[in-house]
Image (cartoon, rainbow, N blue to C red):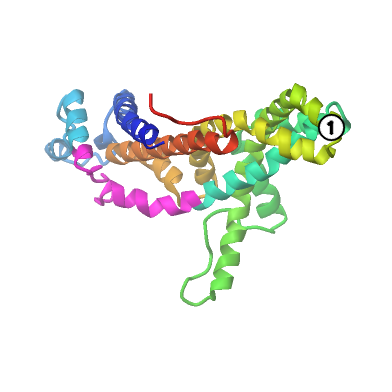
Amino acid sequence: MKTFLWRRIIQFIPLIFGVSLLSFFVMHLAPGDPTSLFTNPNIDPRELARIRANWGLDQPIYLQYFYWLGNLLRGNLGTSYTTGQPVLQEILARLPATLMLMIPAYILTLLITIPLGVICAVKKDSWFDNLITIFSFAGMATPSFWLGLVLMLIFAVQLHWLPAVGISEISATNQSMLARGIDFLRHLILPLSTMVLLSLAGITRYQRAAMLEVLNQDYIRTARAKGLPERMVIYKHALKNALIPIVTIIGLSLPDLFGGAFIIETIFAWPGMGRLGVMAIFQRNYPLIMGIVVFSALLIMLGNLLADLAYAWVDPRIRYAKK
């Protein structure tokens, strides 16, 4: 196991290098640079040239990348063009809000999709299975921004049940911990519901397909022939084996979850890393964009590593031995 972990951690290095290299050059394909956002006609061109030189924008692109890569190897992600704050500090300040949105969304998605997939497989071609199938295909075809706006329109604008944007409306100094917690949960419901509803469709279909394949295996028919209760056959013998491909899907869905967070955090003005990244793109804040790309890639790779480790728990036959 230790050998496997170290091998995977070492593989992070070329992956981070490849992601950063591709992102850096794609980012510079856009015409202009951050100084093009200074629209004041009275700005002295010499002052703009001085700003570009201070930011290193007057250097060739490959030199800019190597300077940035050298700083990254020293643990320095650079300084934000707009705030003058270290990029790592700005990301870490926004990361908790993103995790408070993504982790509950991930947990709720699993708690809903796995039972739904199992029920659909057991009750194949029933009205329940057909209904979930219709909703699944509708969910796959629904854009995240459209669903977020619809939920906001219904529950915030028309019904006034929930707040539309932000993370809190009360001050941390004059309210009790319970009041602050309730206020946070009310703000969390709409963005969390949007992420969960969009994630349900795909994983439910994968769970249903995996469960149907397992239920047709010989050992399931043998368990039933031995007189085991149907509940034990399904949840003890079939479900655990059906979870093996789902572990892969869950690991591969992390990039989609991060990408969806960028859109949903922007729609609901959620002060997380995704919204910070969108603002950085509009501001052409190169150091902040690269910092968020590298940080997101690292979190995704860690998530995939945890998914690989989960194989050994789901299937005891899998062992990560030395090669």
- The picture places residue 108, in percent across and down from the top left corner, at 63, 47
* Residue shown at the point (42%, 38%) measured from the top left: 302
108 above or below 202?
below
Q: Nearer the viewer, residue 291 or 75?
A: 75
Q: Is residue 48 left or right of residue 214?
A: left
For the residue marked with disc 1, what is the amino acid?
Answer: Lys
Residue 13 in view in this figure:
yes
Per the image, the residue denoted by label 1 is: 226
Label 1 crowd (10 A; few <14 / some 14-19 / many >=20)? few
Q: Nearer the viewer, residue 279 or 103?
A: 103
Count all numbered tags in the image, as a single digit.
1
219 above or below 265?
above
* Residue shown at the point (47%, 49%) measured from the top left: 98
- The picture places residue 8, in percent across and down from the top left corner, at 37, 31
Q: Is residue 191 left or right of residue 222?
A: left
* Residue shown at the point (15%, 30%) measured from the top left: 58
Residue 149 in view in this figure:
no
- The picture places residue 37, in percent across and down from the top left corner, at 30, 37
Q: Is residue 101 left or right of residue 210?
A: left
80 falls in the magenta region: yes
- The picture places residue 247, in percent across and down from the top left corner, at 57, 33
Q: Is residue 222 left or right of residue 113?
A: right
Magenta residues (range): 71-99
18 falls in the magenta region: no
Q: Secondary structure at mark 1?
A: loop
Quarter of the picture containing the C terminus is: top left
Q: Which picture quadrant has residue 34?
A: top left
Q: Nearer the viewer, residue 2 or 208?
A: 2
